[in-house]
Image (cartoon, rainbow, N blue to C red):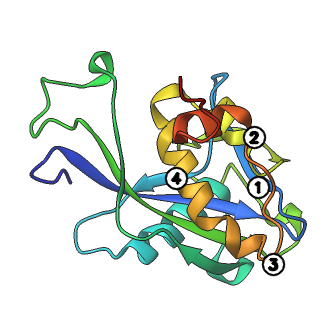
């Protein structure tokens, strides 16, 4: 499903543990890391897509997590020109996403990356909150920064950790006027 502007509706999933570290997964057969995410099907709500993708990609059921919140409105990213498939109609130029912050309430061994026919990931680990911004593919960085910034107060209500210097530069903070 592609909207009239060429964006595919999608959900992004940030799964945290009790100490504020986040779930970071490696795409199968690649040296590419990301948060779980997936498309929203026709007549499916973002929350329904969240739970479907969570089960398909991570093996977790709704009872295994607590929804802490989600981003306001759509966060968009464009694909680099070389990744746009112009031979497919309608043409998808990027994704628009609603990001959810979840807390794992089940034991860690409940995470299963091999429960679907075509697994997305082959390995996962807990990482520091801002680490994904350093490692994600360049064209998703701005969306990751916006999602992590919006959702940080949900798990750090009193003391949000300092984002990496690269994030401050991208957002305009830390620049000196000349």
Which mark sits nearer the N-terminus, 1 or 4?
A: 1
Asked if marks 3 and 2 touch (Cβ < 8 Å), the reply is no
Give the answer, above or below, for where 128 lies relative to 10: above
For the question of whether residue 117 can be seen, the reply is no
For the question of whether residue 12 can be seen, the reply is yes
Which mark sits nearer the N-terminus, 3 or 1?
A: 1
Q: Nearer the viewer, mark 3 or mark 1?
A: 1
Res 11 quadrant in image: bottom left
- In the picture of the structure, the residue carrying the numbered disc 1 is 22
Asked if marks 1 and 4 touch (Cβ < 8 Å), the reply is no
Secondary element at tag 3: loop
- In the picture of the structure, the residue carrying the numbered disc 2 is 131
Left or right, 156 with reference to 38: right
Q: Distance of mark 1 from mark 4, alpha carbons?
A: 16 Å
- In the orientation shown, which residue stands out farthest toward the front? 178
Q: In the rendering, at what x and y percent does residue 151 appear?
A: 61, 66
Q: Distance of mark 3 from mark 1, alpha carbons?
A: 13 Å
Q: In the rendering, at what x and y percent does residue 95 appear?
A: 33, 46
Q: How crowded is mark 2: few (under 14 residues within 10 Å), some or many (20 or more)?
A: some
- In the picture of the structure, the residue carrying the numbered disc 3 is 105
Give the answer, above or below, for where 3 lies relative to 66: above
Which mark sits nearer the N-terminus, 3 or 2?
A: 3
Q: In the rendering, at what x and y percent does residue 139 appear?
A: 45, 30
Which mark sits nearer the N-terminus, 3 or 4?
A: 3
- In the picture of the structure, the residue carrying the numbered disc 4 is 146
- The residue nearer to you, when weighing 110 against 5, is 5
Left or right, 39 with reference to 143: left
Which mark sits nearer the N-terminus, 2 or 1?
A: 1
Asked if marks 4 and 2 touch (Cβ < 8 Å), the reply is no
Q: Nearer the viewer, mark 3 or mark 4?
A: 4
Q: Distance of mark 3 from mark 4, alpha carbons?
A: 25 Å
Give the answer, above or below, for where 175 lies relative to 68: above
């Amino acid at each position: 499903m592609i909207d009239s502007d060429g964006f595919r509706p999608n959900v992004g999933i940030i799964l945290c543990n009790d100490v504020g570290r986040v779930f970071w997964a490696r795409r199968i057969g690649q040296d590419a890391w990301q948060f779980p995410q997936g498309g929203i099907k026709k007549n499916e709500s973002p929350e329904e897509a969240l739970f479907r993708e969570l089960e398909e990609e991570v093996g977790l059921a709704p009872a295994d997590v607590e929804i802490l919140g989600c981003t306001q409105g759509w966060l968009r990213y464009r694909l680099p020109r070389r990744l746009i498939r112009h031979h497919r109609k309608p043409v998808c130029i990027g994704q628009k996403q609603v990001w959810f912050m979840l807390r794992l309430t089940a034991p860690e061994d409940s995470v299963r990356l091999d429960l679907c026919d075509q697994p997305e990931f082959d390995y996962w680990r807990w990482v520091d909150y801002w680490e994904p911004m350093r490692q994600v593919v360049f064209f998703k960085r701005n969306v990751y920064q916006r999602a992590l910034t919006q959702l940080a107060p949900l798990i750090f209500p009193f003391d949000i950790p300092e984002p990496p210097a690269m994030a401050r530069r991208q957002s305009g903070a830390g620049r000196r006027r000349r």
